[in-house]
Image (cartoon, rainbow, N blue to C red):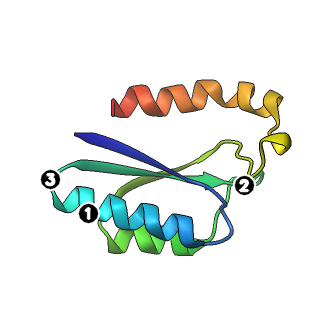
Amino acid sequence: MRILYFLAHPHSLGGAVKVLMTQAYIMQSRGHCVKVIIQNDEQNSHIFEYDKMCQKMNFEYIAARFPIATCIEEIDIYECLNSITDIKRIVQDYLP
């Protein structure tokens, strides 16, 4: 099985990220193909700890810009619509 993990919040490694990375590690150790997508900010950057963690766990990974919202009221629908092409390309290239 091929699995994509999209990680949010490019400037902090919170509990949700650690849980997802642990799950990704378990799935990879069971023979599944895992790829991690790190969220970049408006300047196309994220903290280096994401890269270190992915390298340490031997994950294939890339960074991409995509919107997220912790509360549904905060979602920027226009930014979401502008990100469709990039997200679609990532999914089509990997075929999870």
Is the N terminus in the top left, top right, bottom left or bottom right quadrant? top left
- Give the number of the mark in front: 3 or 2: 3
Mark 1 lies on a secondary structure that is helix
Q: Residue at x 62, y 70 (%)?
A: 47
Residue 38 location in percent, x, y?
54, 55
- For marks 2 and 1 on the same chain, the one whose residue lies earlier in the sequence: 1
| CA distance for labels 2 and 1 | 28 Å
Mark 3 lies on a secondary structure that is loop
Q: Residue at x 31, y 50 (%)?
A: 34
Q: Residue at x 73, y 25 (%)?
A: 81
Q: Residues within 10 Å of mark 1 (few under 14, many from 20)?
A: few
Disc 1 residue type (three-letter): Ile
Q: Which mark is residue 26?
A: 1
Q: Residue at x 14, y 53 (%)?
A: 31
- For marks 1 and 3 on the same chain, the one whose residue lies earlier in the sequence: 1
Q: Which mark is residue 31?
A: 3
Residue 56 location in percent, x, y?
34, 75
Residue 75 location in percent, x, y?
80, 39
Left or right: where does residue 10 sit relative to residue 76? left
